[in-house]
Structure formats: C-alpha cells, structure tokens
C-alpha cells in the first residue's frame, strides 16, 4: 500500500519560536515513520516581508539545522529549501490564474500583515496563500500538519485543488489539515490575545528555540498574567492559560496534573519552574544545533539531496499541470 504524503514548512524569516516548535515541528517528528514526509524551509514566502539578504541566508541554514536538531531525519524525510525547487514558483503562476481576488483579500494573515506594513503592501503578500497551495499540491500531499493560524490557507489550497480538478480533470489530491488540539496556537507572552510570532517587535513576546537560559528566565518572568492569582486553565486568565499550555507541551504532563501541582502556589514559583522546564527541553536541541552548525558540508549535502528528491516529484506534477492547461511540451 502506498504511504500517505505529508507536507509542511516554516519561513526563515527570523529565529524560530517555541510557537513554531510546539504548533508545527514537534508534530512533524512523529509522522516521519508512518508517512512520506516533505519538510521545506520556505524562503520564497519569507521575502513577502523585507529581508536583509545576508540574514536570510543565515536564517535559512539555521532553520535547516534546527529541523535536524529537533529530530527530522534526512534518511526518512525529504528536507529541502523551497527556492531550490523552481516548480513552486511555476505552479504558483498557474494557480494565480484560477484564484479569486475576493477570496485572497479575506485572508486573515494578509489583513494583519498588510496593516503592519502599509508601505510594503506588495503583491507577494497578497498571493502568499497561492504559493502555499502550490507547495502542498505539488507533492500530492494528503496531510498538512500546521498550527491553527494556517487553517484558512489550507482551506484555500483545497478550493484551488478542487477548482483545477473540475476545470481540467483530476490532477491534484485535495489535502487535509492536521491540527493538534493542544498547542495549536501559542500566544504572545506580552499580549495573550495575539499569537506568538517571530516577527513581533517586542522580543519579550516570544521565546526562541535558540534562546539562552537567562533570556528564557527573563522572558517567562515578564510574561503577562493577571491579578486573580490562581493557576487555572480558563478564558478569564489568558496569560496563565498560555503558560499552562507551554508547560504541558514541554513537560508532557496534562493541564489537570499541572493545575493540581500548583494549587495554592503563586505565579512566581510557577514561572520559575516553567522557565527551567523550557530550558531543559531546549537544551538537547541547542547542543545538537551547535554541532550541526560546525558541519556546513553536511548541511549542504542534506539540502542538495533534499532538493533533488523534491524536484523529481514536484516536476512530475508540474508537467501534468502544464499539459492539462494546454502548454506545448518542451
Ligand atoms: N504561535 C504559534 N502557535 C502555534 N503554531 C504556530 N506556528 C507559527 N506560530 C505559531 C506554526 O508554525 C508553522 C510555520 O509558520 P511560519 O513561520 O511559516 O509562518 P507564521 O505562521 O507566520 O509564523 P510566525 O512566527 O508568525 O512568522 P512571521 O512572524 O514571520 O510571520 C506553521 O505551521 C504555523 O501554523
């Protein structure tokens, strides 16, 4: 029986946060044995907001090393840099021609990002979800493990697949999102009503996978809570609720177990323990990351082999698409 296909990716638009880890990467690891997995570093997406070229190069390599340090294995999964597989940009063009402006303008991420960068309201930001649809559809992915914030984009990918199939006959598999209930949306430590984001201007709002212990202690200590003073998981205490989610993701304990453990205990002690749990959880990843960054030849081998494998599958789909829309074969 053929194995089901999984596709996902993260933008190298800065250091990755524990939101990226809990909501996405952590879940990718366990899928590797059961599925045919494609994990990309989506640099084409990253340039939809201004990037400093040398930082983008550095971040791209670092994200690759973080993937490997978190437990992605190139022997099991295809790990590649998006811009190395030109089919992504090519399929995006074709999908653009069947995407409706109205639907794209309703995308929450577009609305939020365009508000933040009014002077950089570029067309790439608008068609970002079309590129994401191309990423997924090229590999005929069955499942896309993402955080909750990407649900709307996934819906668009499904619509485009169905629209293309209806217009030109069956070509794309219609993908399903795979969103874990716990940790699907890790919130900002400074504003628990918005999601933790690596591009947040306030660095106290997020914890990076590569943050040093002191920074983690400082950020957790400063995390916004409330004056209720009880460690309970509920919507009246959004800050505490978020910290409990993070505690649970790193410790493996259920929310209920943690609530019981901290009954009658103040926020200070809870935060101190949480910081140490995050530090210990990230320690092996950071050690492995440091080793990997000393071995650039190995990293280069991984992304080159990944691009070769990914290109083979992606080009197969692209050829089919070009044939169906009426392009003459080369
Ligand atoms: N806070 C979060 N909680 C849970 N999951 C999250 N993801 C991102 N933030 C959280 C998931 O990580 C994957 C990759 O995201 P991305 O970096 O490609 O884009 P993003 O969702 O826009 O993430 P950021 O950190 O907010 O990036 P910037 O600041 O550059 O826009 C996705 O699966 C996402 O759901």
Image (cartoon, rainbow, N blue to C red):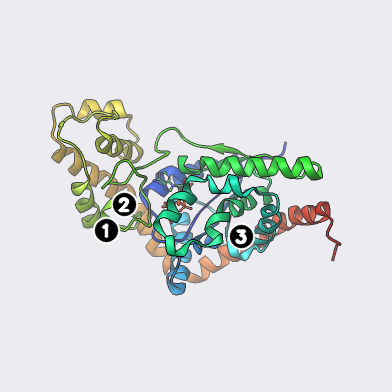
Q: Judge from the rendering whether residue 271 lies leftward or rightward of residue 178; answer left or right.
A: left
Snapshot quadrant of residue 159: top right
Q: Nearer the viewer, mark 2 or mark 3?
A: 2
Dot 2, how many residues are within 10 Å of its Cα: few (below 14), some (14-19), or many (20+)? many
Q: Is residue 138 visible?
A: yes
* Residue topped by disc 1: 212
Q: Nearer the viewer, residue 70 or 114?
A: 114
* Residue topped by disc 2: 206
| CB under 8 Å between discs 3 and 1 | no
Disc on res. 239 = none
Question: Where is residue 79 shown, x and y percent of the image?
Answer: 57, 56
Quadrant of the snapshot with the N terminus:
top right
Q: What element carries label 3?
A: helix
* Residue topped by disc 3: 306
Asked if the residue at label 2 sits under 8 Å from ligand 1, the reply is yes
Q: Judge from the rendering whether residue 165 lies leftward or rightward of residue 251; answer left or right.
A: right
């Amino acid at each position: 029986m053929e194995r089901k296909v999984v596709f996902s990716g993260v933008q190298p638009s800065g250091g990755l946060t524990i939101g990226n880890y809990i909501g996405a990467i952590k879940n990718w690891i366990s899928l590797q044995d059961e599925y045919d997995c494609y994990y990309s570093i989506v640099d084409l997406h990253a340039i939809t907001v201004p990037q400093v070229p040398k930082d983008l190069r550095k971040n791209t390599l670092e994200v690759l090393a973080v993937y490997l340090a978190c437990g992605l294995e190139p022997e099991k999964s295809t790990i590649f840099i998006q811009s190395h597989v030109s089919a992504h940009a090519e399929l995006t063009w074709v999908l653009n021609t069947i995407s409706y402006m109205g639907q794209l303008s309703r995308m929450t991420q577009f609305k939020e990002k365009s508000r933040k960068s009014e002077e950089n309201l570029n067309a790439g930001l608008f068609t970002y979800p079309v590129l994401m649809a191309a990423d997924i559809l090229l590999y005929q992915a069955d499942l896309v493990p993402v955080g909750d914030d990407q649900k709307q984009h996934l819906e668009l990918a499904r619509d485009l697949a169905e629209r293309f199939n209806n217009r030109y006959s069956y070509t794309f598999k219609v993908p399903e999102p795979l969103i874990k209930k716990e940790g699907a949306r890790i919130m900002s430590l400074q504003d628990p009503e918005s999601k933790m984001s690596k591009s947040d201007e306030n660095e106290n709002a997020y914890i990076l996978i590569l943050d040093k212990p002191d920074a983690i202690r400082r950020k957790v200590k400063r995390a916004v809570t409330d004056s209720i003073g009880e460690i309970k998981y509920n919507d009246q205490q959004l800050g505490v609720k978020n910290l409990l989610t993070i505690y649970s993701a790193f410790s493996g304990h259920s929310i209920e177990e943690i609530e019981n453990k901290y009954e009658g205990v103040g926020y200070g002690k809870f935060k101190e323990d949480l910081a140490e749990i995050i530090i210990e959880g990230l320690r092996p990843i950071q050690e492995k990351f440091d080793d990997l960054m000393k071995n650039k030849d190995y990293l280069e081998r991984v992304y080159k082999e990944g691009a070769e494998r990914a290109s083979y599958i992606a080009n197969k789909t692209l050829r089919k698409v070009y044939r169906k829309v009426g392009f003459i074969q080369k």
